[in-house]
Image (cartoon, rainbow, N blue to C red):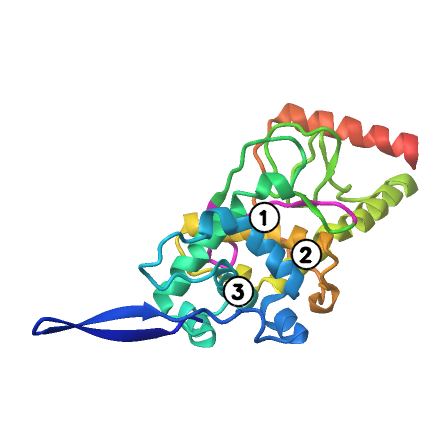
Amino acid sequence: MAGVVHRYHRLGSRKYRERMYAEHAKPLAQYTTEELYARFRFGRDDIKYIADLVRPKLQHKTKRSPALFVEEQCLIALRFYASGTFYQVVGNNMGVDKSTVSNVVKAVSVELASLVKEFVSFPKDDQMAEWQYVNRKGRHSINVQSVANADLIITNCVLQSNRPNGIILGDSAYPLLPWLMTTFPVANTPEQAGFNSAHCKTRCAIECLNGVLKRCFACLNYLQVEPKVACNIILACIVLHNIATRHNVPLDDIYDGPEPDEVQPPMFTPNEGQTGRVIRDAIVRHYF
């Protein structure tokens, strides 16, 4: 981090002090590879890559204040995402004050969230939406609906009411729609049982994803920030997850089972439900 030194000058009979900012130490050099993964969830090259993504907006031009390097800002934000602890605790660990952590987390989250279209793409839909509600545990929550492929790449982070290209598999919290297939509540035939089994096996990816996200980015378990900031942090973590997965950052060690369902289904009409049943029956007839 940057240090502050003072240079004293005399102008006539008056003495004044000029504040000078010492050279920043290389922020990544002080950590071993193991420490980087343990504290920030990313290795040295990956952190440099993330810093380059947000550098255009976070690079400070002024020399009048002890501006943090972009790498330092990324480390502060990554430490918060990974630990989910209080700003004060993160600040103590990183050598900055609480307000600096708050400002940095907000700024980095905004820039990472702005990259969501670049790193999350399915279907081609420019809209994003969030729902705020009280969950079954009585806590205020922001509902995030994720779509992922078998490689745990998040392909969509909000499920829109518009029909996507293709069919999405949903759990029992979702309605049966023409483009959203759920399991049979009761399998009355071997074919229906086969459909339910294949459905559950395929959906394992999203169950695993939920666990990986919350283990890797512990802040997602409990965010004590206003909803707008929370939404940016959530999207930032989703972007970081896809970066980690594509860069083969080891995430498997932090997964220890699926997360319980805690979702708010999208709106639908009765006609869509009837059409969904017809499509599901057709799938069973043709493939099971």
Along the line of sight, the residue nearer the viewer: 138 or 63: 63
Question: Which residue was labeled with disc 3?
Answer: 75
Relative vertical location of residue 275 with respect to residue 146 in this rendering, above or below: above
Amino acid carrying label 2: it is Ala
Work out how far the residue at label 3 is from the one at label 2, CA to CA, in angstroms.
15 Å
Amino acid carrying label 1: it is Val
Crowding around mark 1 (Cα neighbors within 10 Å: few <14, some 14 to 19, many 20+) is some
Counting from the top left corner in percent of width and height, residue 184 is at 78, 41
Along the line of sight, the residue nearer the viewer: 238 or 244: 244
Q: Residue at x 60, y 31 (%)?
A: 125
Crowding around mark 2 (Cα neighbors within 10 Å: few <14, some 14 to 19, many 20+) is some
- Residue 133 visible? The answer is no
Q: Tell me, for residue 158, which label it has, or none.
A: none
Mark 3 or 1: in front is 3
Residue extent of the magenta highlight: 132-150
Mark 3 or 2: in front is 3
Residue 80: within the magenta?
no
Q: Secondary structure at mark 3?
A: helix
Relative vertical location of residue 111 with respect to residue 73 in this rendering, above or below: above
Mark 2 or 1: in front is 2
Q: Secondary structure at mark 2?
A: helix
